Amino acid sequence: YLQNLDGARDLLADASPHMTGQAPVCDVAFLMPSAWWWCHPEWHWPQRTFQVANAVRDRMDYEVVDEGMVRDGTLDRLGIRLLVLCEGEFLERETLDALGRWIEAGGRLILAGELPRYDEHMEPCTVLADFAGTRPEGLFVHPSEILTDEEALLAALRAAGWEQRLSFSEGLQACVHHYGIDKFVFFFHFGGEAAAEHEVVVDGVKLALTVGPKTCGVVHLKGEHIASYLVK
């Protein structure tokens, strides 16, 4: 919200040297089916998309794009290689055409359930159905049951070429900020009453952590070496 940014002017000014404009290190996105959503004004969000994306948010990084962003070439600008579509009997024709061009260029689309076969005017549009027969390596169609099984969805992503770059043990939360060759690993642990052993794996580098309750910190990695750390 704009008013929140206005109240954080000093923080943004202090952090401006680190705001390089580099694209996020993330190659997966969920597609928000805009036209399908607008036809359901009773929904706060597209239900399947929200539920599935929320279920895996602790397991992977991802972007969320809508149909307008797909049409405008956002998938290429962000370096998205895998796109997940959880629902929608139809998409806008321009979106379907853009997805076709993206798949032809090497993108991979993961669909749960039925292929969208109509455009926004409910006219037949077989762009994606055609790829199912002519370019199966770019289109992965799975039964809708994978949407209720987190492990099945992650397995579908791996089968399409996704590689998990960050993992952490149960009870811990972690995220990574990339800055050139440097990585800053932020971790958070709020459970338990005694010290516990945890680990974070970032691009194959394993950090073994001994953390107490209500502990958070950041570890600065240069390559495979710890340059510094801060724990609170």
Image (spheres, rainbow, N blue to C red):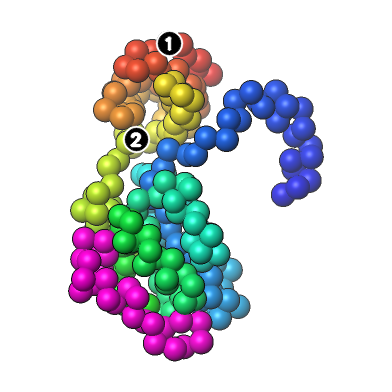
Residue occupying the point 49% across, 76% down: 92
Work out which residue is located at the far top of the displayed protein and give it.
Answer: 227
Quarter of the rendering containing residue 136: bottom left
Q: Where is residue 67 drawn, in percent x and y?
A: 51, 66
Q: Is residue 158 placed above or below 25 in the rendered structure?
A: below
Q: What element carries label 2?
A: strand
Q: Give the range drawn in magenta.
A: 117-146
Q: Do the residues labelled 1 and 2 touch (CB within 8 Å)?
A: no
**Residue 225 seen by the camera:** yes
Name the residue carrying label 2.
166
- The label number, if any, that marks residue 227 in the structure image: 1
Query: Gap between marks 1 and 2, in whole Å?
Result: 19 Å
**Residue 62 seen by the camera:** no
* Nearer to the camera, 10 or 207: 10
Q: Which circle's residue, 1 or 2, is located before the other in the chain?
A: 2
* Nearer to the camera, 192 or 159: 159
Q: Is residue 150 placed above or below 99 in the rendered structure?
A: above
Is 59 on the left or on the right of 36, as rendered?
left
Quarter of the rendering containing residue 133: bottom left
Under mark 1, the amino acid is: Ala
Q: Is residue 221 placed above or below 89 in the rendered structure?
A: above
Find out whether residue 226 is within the magenta segment. no
* Nearer to the camera, 21 or 198: 21
Find out whether residue 133 is within the magenta segment. yes
Residue occupying the point 50% across, 54% down: 74
Residue occupying the point 70% across, 23% down: 14
Q: Where is residue 224 drawn, in percent x and y?
A: 31, 17
Q: What element carries label 1?
A: strand
Under mark 2, the amino acid is: Leu
